[in-house]
Image: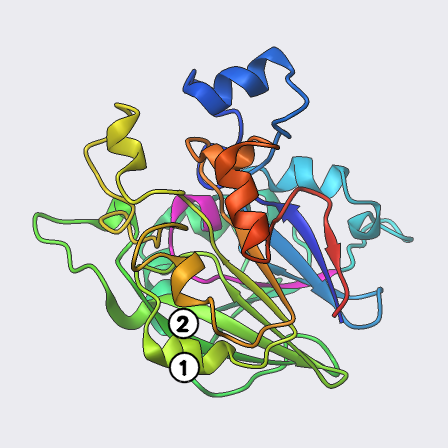
């Protein structure tokens, strides 16, 4: 099994198009300490020929262009992308589906709740039904998006997508709105959880012994967006777990037995994006890596 990181940033990427926060300012200036990043998505393969995408970011076309293994390989129309698995209905995870509208055969895997959200928005009808099969996935029931690969979806503490929020928003609910994915192939296990509002005991049990964990790295501190004057929302209110703090990922996963632990879906405000910063050093000293665009992981 091989995982290719197509995009490693949270919504907006790094730098965000309209942002001059300290991290984005460094990225705009070309400072080598801050690598530019597109919005999060990965591609997973067993044989190097067929790939499944996990989430389709708004930057998907750019990501495909930058990833030769995803280029057409013959015939008038061809793509090694055989399917897409969507973990929630966030714009950063579904907008790229519109890039896949050129009548290419593939399968779209998502929970019943997420498929219903897509079906309710007519713009996604550009994914022609005779070409794109929409297949519902049930929680805790394995399915096979690729030959010789088993994937199991599980509920993560989260919330509905921002564009679906009403006056009252439940944070931390565990249902079909936000899911994580467990990949198994060749005796290896990879867990992918790019959006998670709380590291529960159940999640710790799920990831124990995994060869690789890709986990929500949106912010370093829970009040980071507020401190920068970028938002009035904490990370937890946005449906994410901060890296630091008593309930943060660094502390909660500290005793977990995991082969490699990698933060993904990293927001442009996160100072850990700056190489050599105190925050980056703290993350690395705790045994974590930061995903970057083009990163390849073969457990």
Q: Is 296 included in the stretch rendered in magenta? A: no
Relative placement, left or right, of 77 versus 279 is right
Query: For mark 2, what is the residue?
Result: 111
Above or below 205: residue 234: above
Callout 2–callout 1 Cβ contact below 8 Å: yes
For the N terminus, which image quadrant? bottom right
For the C terminus, which image quadrant? bottom right
* Quarter of image, res 150: bottom right
Q: CA distance from mark 2 to mark 1?
A: 8 Å
* Quarter of image, res 275: top right
**Residue nearer the viewer, 273 or 153:** 273
Disc 1 element: loop
- Residue 254 visible to the viewer: yes
Query: For mark 1, what is the residue?
Result: 139
Name the residue rendered at 44%, 35% in the picture. 270
User: Disc 2 or disc 1, which is closer to the eye?
Assistant: 1
Q: Within 10 angstroms of label 2, few (less than 14), some, or many (20 or more) residues? A: many
- Residue 130 visible to the viewer: no
Image coordinates of residue 238 in percent, x first then y, are: 27, 47
The segment highlighted magenta reads 81-93
Disc 2 element: loop
Residue at the far top: name it: 29
Image coordinates of residue 96 in percent, x first then y, are: 54, 45
**Residue nearer the viewer, 190 or 131:** 190
The disc, 2 or 1, on the residue closer to the chain's N-terminal end is 2
Q: How many marks?
A: 2
Name the residue rendered at 45%, 69% in the picture. 180
């Amino acid at each position: 099994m091989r995982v290719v990181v197509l995009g490693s940033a949270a919504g907006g990427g790094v730098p965000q198009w309209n942002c001059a926060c300290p991290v984005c300012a460094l990225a705009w200036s070309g400072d080598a300490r801050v690598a530019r990043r597109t919005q999060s998505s990965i591609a997973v393969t067993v044989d190097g020929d067929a790939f499944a995408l996990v989430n389709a970011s708004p930057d998907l076309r750019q990501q495909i262009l930058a990833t030769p293994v995803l280029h057409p390989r013959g015939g008038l129309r061809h793509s090694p992308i055989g399917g897409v698995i969507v973990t929630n209905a966030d714009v950063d995870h579904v907008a790229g589906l519109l890039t896949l509208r050129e009548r290419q055969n593939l399968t779209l895997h998502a929970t019943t709740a997420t498929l219903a959200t897509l079906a309710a928005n007519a713009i996604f009808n550009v994914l022609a039904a005779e070409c794109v099969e929409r297949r519902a996935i049930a929680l805790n029931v394995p399915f096979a998006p690729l030959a010789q690969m088993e994937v199991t979806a599980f509920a993560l503490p989260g919330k509905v997508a921002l564009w679906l929020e009403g006056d009252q928003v439940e944070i931390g609910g565990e249902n079909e709105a936000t899911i994580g994915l467990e990949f198994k192939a060749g005796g290896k296990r990879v867990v992918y959880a790019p959006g998670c509002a709380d590291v529960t005991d159940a999640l710790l049990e799920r990831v124990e012994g995994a060869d690789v964990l890709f986990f929500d790295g949106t912010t370093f501190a829970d009040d980071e967006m507020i401190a920068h004057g970028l938002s009035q929302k904490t990370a937890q209110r946005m449906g994410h777990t901060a890296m630091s703090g008593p309930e943060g990922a660094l502390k909660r996963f500290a005793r977990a037995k995991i082969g490699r632990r990698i933060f993904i879906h990293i927001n442009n405000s996160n100072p850990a994006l700056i190489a050599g910063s105190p925050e980056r050093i703290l993350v690395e000293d705790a045994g974590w890596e930061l995903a970057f665009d083009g990163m390849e992981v073969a457990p």
